[in-house]
Amino acid sequence: MSALTREPGRWTIAIAGLLSLATAMGIGRFAFTPLLPMMLSDGVIDLPAASWLASANYFGYLVGALLCTFQPWIWKRFAFLPQVAGPTWVRTGLVATTLLTLGMALQLPAAWPVLRFAAGVASALVFVYTSGWCLAQLARRNAPMMGGVIYAGPGAGIALSGLFASGMVALQWRAAAGWLIFGGLAALLTAVVWRTFQQRDGQGAPAAGAPSTPQRMDAPAGRKQMLWLAGAYGLAGFGYIITATFLPVIARAAMPGSVWIDFFWPIFGVGVITGALLATRIPASGDYRHLLAGCYVVQALGIAASIVSPTLAGFAIGSLLLGIPFTAITFFAMQEVRRLRPAAVASYMGLLTAMYGIGQIAGPPMAALLLRHSRSVGEGFTLSLEIAAASLVAGALMYLWMVSAYPVAGRASRPASSRS
């Protein structure tokens, strides 16, 4: 029996990746969003403090991404450190996510920024190493486009946490109970995927390398091209984060007393799942930057819908349009990294994730500043959302410029490797 037949099949890998990202992203990062109104109602936090608590999580996400980016340098510099395989990082991050989520149930507000920061670090590690390992394993099995199933994970976690939170609001539970429930759910999902994420003979060390099956790849991209790609990807982090952090609060301010408010976040999650699965149907032969530009425009339209029509229909359509491209953007961007830097996938996935993290960090403090200097909560959020939508449009234009400046190999008049 070959080594490959002893390893998990493609569906096992895809589902394990989905559940891993559902835990680290849908719960470890985004459970805060549906629980925030409950925390506000309990009087344990206010909006400015919530903004900084969210930023602590996003800063942790940035730090985790940077650890992934500079992992080869760290191991080279500190040769005495044991090299840790990608699946081991995934397991470690999932256990940390579970414990840190449970820790938020403790009535220790002074510790919450530390817990949210650490949860951000854990979610970045799980995201990068789940993405790298699962995409490489699927490529070995001639199923690279099944990676879209993996990126349905955050949407599944978001939808599930949103529905749980809606039920808890209806039952008038306190936020602490919500954190305990989400921590228990994270523990359950971690147990389900535990056996899949293990190092097997011949799987290579710390991170996912290049796939062993044929795939469209250019010569390694120049530094400027990678910086443009990372910069455009960072704008996606800034563009969506205001809505992703404050959607239930924004909806409550615009539609006080509505029974539908708590369903907008699950709708966002359903959109994320839909977009990720649709991404698996798109042929791998196209230019991912066209797809990325289109995704940014769709998200900008989603934000615009909630600005132009702060009603039930406007928020529902806006939530769906914001969600559909959410992880499709990540999937297409990570495939672009695999095309341009096949020999250093994890490091450059870490770079893009770090830029995304910087964008996320900037969003909540900007919203807090605008809220403080606006005449009303609605006015402050509207201006924040307008800036977010504009940043997404700018990112779309950057991708379209890159299509022209750095054509895919075989379409350019000169090779991409000749460009800096």
Image (cartoon, rainbow, N blue to C red):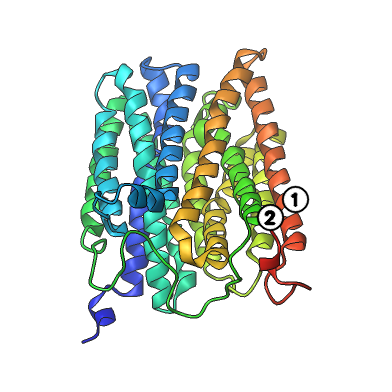
Question: Which residue occupies the foreground of this view, 157 or 92?
Answer: 92
Q: Residue at x 56, y 20 (%)?
A: 368
In percent of width and height, residue 342 lies at 50, 67
Q: In the rendered image of this protein, does residue 9 appear above or below residue 190?
A: below
Q: Quadrant of the C terminus?
A: bottom right
Q: Answer left or right for 196 relative to 141.
A: left
Q: Name the residue under label 1.
A: 397
Query: Mark 2 falls on what kind of element?
Result: helix
The percent position of residue 179, horizontal first and vertical second, equals 29, 32
Q: Residues within 10 Å of mark 1 (few under 14, many from 20)?
A: some
Is residue 415 visible in this depiction of the protein? Answer: yes
Quarter assignment of residue 389: top right
Residue 232: x and y in percent read 64, 48
Q: What residue type is labelled 2?
A: Ala
Sort mark 2 into few (<14), some (14-19) or many (20+) by Cα contacts within 10 Å.
many
Q: Tell me the number on the disc at residue 383.
A: none
Residue 45 occupies quadrant: top left
Amino acid type at image mark 1: Leu
Q: What element carries label 1?
A: helix
The structure residue drawn at horizontal position 66% and vertical position 56%, both measured from the top left corner, is: 225
Front position in the image: 116 or 80: 80
